[in-house]
Image: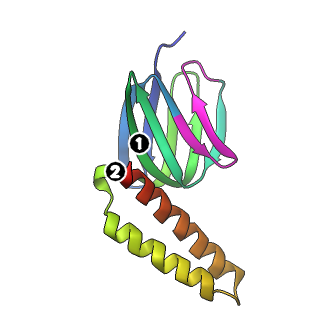
Amino acid sequence: MASKVNLKIIQPDRTKLVGEYDHIIIPGEEGDFGVYPDHTPLITRIRPGELSLYTGEQITRYAVHDGFVTIDTDVVTIVCEVVEQDIEIDLKRAEESKGRAEERMKQSTSSEVDFRRAELALKRALVRINISNN
């Protein structure tokens, strides 16, 4: 029985993080889910949301955006476009992005695609703001 969750986070241009944690909370497509040592193998998509890494009493939070996770017997691998810790987030830029996305959603009456793109941009901005303010 494993005592830690081995995590590897991969972005298109590099491996962002490798570490061991007591447990992690992942923003799954159907909702957040926890991963503890010896978790059942799984492959699923992730949505823009907060990734929480637990080590003892310490919690490290990251904003993640679209990707997928594979859980194997000894390692959890997250592959995503963007993963940002609070210190990497430009709060002013995230708030500006939120405002632009909200405005595009209001004006986007002719195209469902434009509305969905604005909605995703809004979700990503809100996650960044939440992580930055935590």
Please tell me which residue is depicted at 46% across the width and 19% down the height of the picture: 4
Q: Is residue 50 left or right of residue 107?
A: left
Residue nearest the observer in this picture, 69 or 57: 57
Q: Disc 1 marks which residue?
A: 61
Q: Which residues are magenta?
A: 25-39
**Kind of residue indicated by mark 1:** Arg
Q: Is residue 93 left or right of residue 38?
A: left
Coloration of the structure image: rainbow
Please name whichever residue, 53 or 113, is drawn nearer the observer in this view of the structure: 53
Q: Position of residue 55 (x, y in %)?
A: 39, 25
Q: Quadrant of the N terminus?
A: top right
- Name the kind of residue labelled 2 in the image: Asp
Q: Secondary structure at mark 1?
A: strand
In magenta stretch: residue 99:
no
Is most of the magenta stretch helix, strand or loop? strand
* Residue 18's disc number: none
Rendered view: 83 above or below 92: above
Query: Mark 1 and mark 2 in contact (Cβ < 8 Å)?
Result: yes
Q: Which mark is residue 86?
A: 2
Circle 2 Cα neighbour tier, 10 Å, few/some/many (<14 / 14–19 / ≥20): some
